[in-house]
Image (spheres, rainbow, N blue to C red):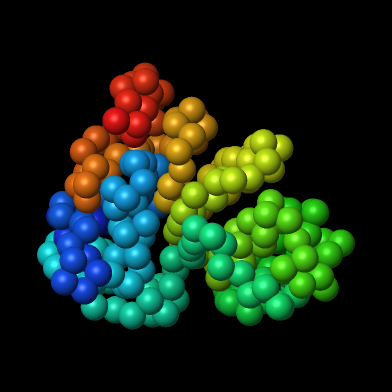
Amino acid sequence: MSEPLLAVRSLAGGYGPVDVLFDVDLHIEPGHVVALCGRNGMGKTSTIRAIMGALTHRNGTIRFGGQSLVGKPPHVIARLGIGIVPEGRQLFPSLSIRENLEVLARGTLTGGWTLQRAIDLFPRLGSMLDRPAWQTSGGEQQMIAISRALMTNPKLLILDEATEGLAPLVRHQIWQTLHRLKTEGLALLVIDKNLRALSRIADFCYVLERGRTSWRGTGEQLAAERENVERMLTV
């Protein structure tokens, strides 16, 4: 059996001496969409930081593309093929949209993601490429953040609360975009609170509770047990 694209096993870690993750398991196969759910403060963003090398590692393994990520610095991990759309977007506000998209661009021999392809994904950005990022709406900023991550040409795209605080029409567009990326074969790790939308796109789902994996199941199981999982997220 081939190794998953991303395999996190028995992960434990924290910030300095303070532990926040105790036993996290997470597997992502190539081309699959995996949802990571949990109440605020349960370890979702900390798990992402551990994957990206920004959390003190205590125990467990993190493997991507067949090699260990433990001990590697964030910039090396990113170059291995992990793109991230962080919570809060973290754009460069004084740079133009074009500059935000091109600053981390990394081409491939087969072409991959380019500025034109990003505009095709989000046509709204095409007419405002020279506008500073701070002069854009929250929805436009999220489009920029997703496009910027894609232009690193990742094998895995991680999205941390990518629809949080957006207008309904923009949220709908983001979900449509994730569906499109899935059909194109890009692996996704999605953190979001919308279980209904997640169940429609996710191949698998994990729920974290106090730094531990407390529930796991397929997208179909998430749809069937959505009310039970929602109770886990609101207790």
Q: Is residue 78 visible?
A: yes
51 above or below 24?
below
Q: Quadrant of residue 148?
A: bottom right
Q: Quadrant of residue 13?
A: bottom left
Count numbered badges in the picture.
0
Question: Where, quadrant-wise, is the C terminus in this rendering?
Answer: top left
From the top left corner, tell me how far across and down residue 85 is, in percent: 52, 60
Q: Residue at x 67, y 36 (%)?
A: 168
54 above or below 144?
below
Q: Residue at x 56, y 68 (%)?
A: 90
From the top left corner, tell me how far across and down residue 66 is, in percent: 27, 65
- Left or right: 194 in relation to 125: left
From the top left corner, tell me how far across and down residue 34 is, in percent: 39, 44
- Left or right: 79 in relation to 111: left
Q: Is residue 67 visible?
A: no
Q: Quadrant of residue 167?
A: top right
